[in-house]
Image (cartoon, rainbow, N blue to C red):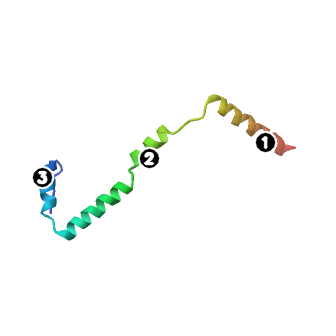
Amino acid sequence: MQLQKDIQLNQLITLIKGLSEIQRRKLKAELDRLENNPSDTSLEEFLLSAPTFSENQIQMIEETRKAFDQWRKN
């Protein structure tokens, strides 16, 4: 079966209705797999919306790192 790129929803539904039961199960399994595997854009959106450190927290981390470095040298 060959599909067009710019297919309308009602055309897609008509094509799906024309599939055999086995083909519909395979289609459903593929759609379920796609839903369970978030795309890279959703990962990017998640990372961009993640919380960030405040300036005070960054300063505290740097001070702690310097203190550990100094302690290791002694």
Count residues near mark 2 (Cα–Cα under 10 Å), then give few for <14, some for 14-19, many for 20+.
Answer: few
**Badge number at residue 68:** 1
Indicate left or right for 27 with 52 as reference.
left
Indicate left or right for 10 with 67 as reference.
left
Task: Residue at the far bottom: name it.
Answer: 22
Foreground tag (2 vs 1): 2
Q: In which quadrant will I find the C terminus? A: top right
Q: Position of residue 61 (x, y in %)?
A: 69, 37
Q: Amino acid at mark 1?
A: Phe
Q: Earlier in the sequence, mark 3 or mark 2?
A: 3
Mark 1 element type: helix
Count residues near mark 1 (Cα–Cα under 10 Å), then give few for <14, some for 14-19, many for 20+.
Answer: few
Q: Position of residue 3 (x, y in %)?
A: 16, 56
Q: Position of residue 9 (x, y in %)?
A: 16, 49
Mark 2 element type: helix
At x 38%, y 50%, the residue is: 39
**Badge number at residue 43:** 2
Q: Is residue 7 visible?
A: no
**Badge number at residue 48:** none
At x 29%, y 58%, the residue is: 31
Q: Is residue 8 visible?
A: yes
Task: Residue at the far top: name it.
Answer: 55
Q: Which residue is mark 3?
A: 11
At x 24%, y 67%, the residue is: 25
Q: Earlier in the sequence, mark 3 or mark 1?
A: 3
Residue 33 placement: quadrant: bottom left
